[in-house]
Image (cartoon, grey):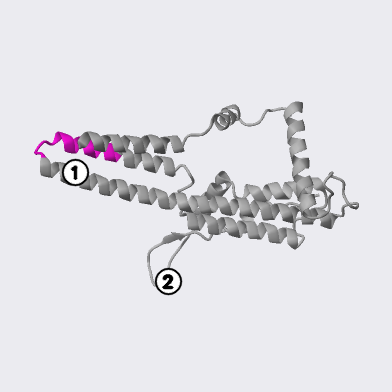
Amino acid sequence: MLVRLRSVVGIVLIGGAAAGCANSDEIKARFNGRWGPDPAIQAASFATEAQNQSLVLNYLGRSAGLIASDGTPFRPLLPADYAEIAQWGFNIGRQDCEIYMDNLFRLSREKGRNDNILAAASTAAAAIVTGTTTSQKPLSILAAVFGLSIALNDAIFQSYLFTQAPGLVAKKVSDLQEVFRNSVVSGQVKITSAASAYYAVQSYYHICLPHSIEGVMLQSIANANPVTPLGSGGTNFIAGGAGSTPTTAIRTPELQ
């Protein structure tokens, strides 16, 4: 029975490890970009990125009903048209971000479920072995196997931005996105050209990137101010200091 249990746990561990691995293209991209971008713009990569940005704007313009299927505008585009194109980009970005937030929530629940199952299986297996043998060796092996499986499960799932609760992450990201979008609607961020429209959409996407979310969370902690609660002589720390509001976590420059 002990051999069977070890085999089952081994299969679970291998499956979990495989789920956390990246494909070859992703690994290659990470390896090539480990030192950041090239210090000088490369013509080949520049042309590729510029074409990609033009295609993105073209698709958004077609969705907004401003550009024909062949890429020709129905009329000369006005600054307000570029703002409308950016709004379509925000809609797509919000949808992609919602999918990401939903995945984070599900992964968080799956992590907790797996830990509970493995802990229960470890307890049950130990009880069975204790009732069928007086040797301590099987118990030590079981403890090591299940301990490793729980640690590996945590290591895999915690790599997906689990330093904060997924619900808190989703709320913070939603607030930041609303602030940024409202700054465009109110005219605080001006979009008057294709370049500024793309920059606005890219900045909106940046809000939902894992490293951006982590930076916002860490900034909220760093900006926490010590306060003395009413009726207490002690000092506590709360998040709410200068710079912890959503508006400071995003850039809202004049986009020309």
User: Crowding at label 1, few (<14), some or many (≥20) Cα neighbours within 10 Å?
Assistant: some
Q: Looking at the rendering, in which quadrant would you find the N terminus? A: top left
Badge 2 amino acid: Leu
User: Can you say whether 167 is above or below 199 in the image?
Assistant: below
User: Can you say whether 35 is above or below 83 in the image?
Assistant: above
Q: Is residue 36 visible?
A: yes
Outermost residue toward the left? 134
| Residue 74 magenta | no
**Disc 2 secondary structure class:** loop
Disc 1 from disc 2: Cα separation = 51 Å
The foreground one among 113 and 184 is 113
| Residue 144 magenta | yes
Residue 17 image offset from top left, x and y in percent: 41, 35
Residue 90 image offset from top left, x and y in percent: 69, 54
* Residue indicated by mark 2: 230
User: Crowding at label 2, few (<14), some or many (≥20) Cα neighbours within 10 Å?
Assistant: few
Q: Earlier in the sequence, mark 1 or mark 2?
A: 1
Q: Which residues are magenta?
A: 133-147
Q: Is residue 78 left or right of residue 255?
A: right
Badge 1 amino acid: Ala
Q: Residue at x 43, y 68 (%)?
A: 229
**Disc 1 secondary structure class:** helix
Q: Is residue 236 left or right of residue 116?
A: right
Instruction: Name the mark on residue 179.
Output: none
Q: Is residue 42 visible?
A: no
Q: Main secondary structure of the magenta part?
A: helix
Q: Residue at x 46, y 42 (%)?
A: 159
In the rendered structure, are the residues bearing label 1 and label 2 in contact, judged by CB atoms less than 8 Å apart? Answer: no
Instruction: Name the mark on residue 126.
Output: 1
Outermost residue toward the bottom? 231
Residue 243 image offset from top left, x and y in percent: 59, 56
Q: Residue at x 55, y 45 (%)?
A: 210
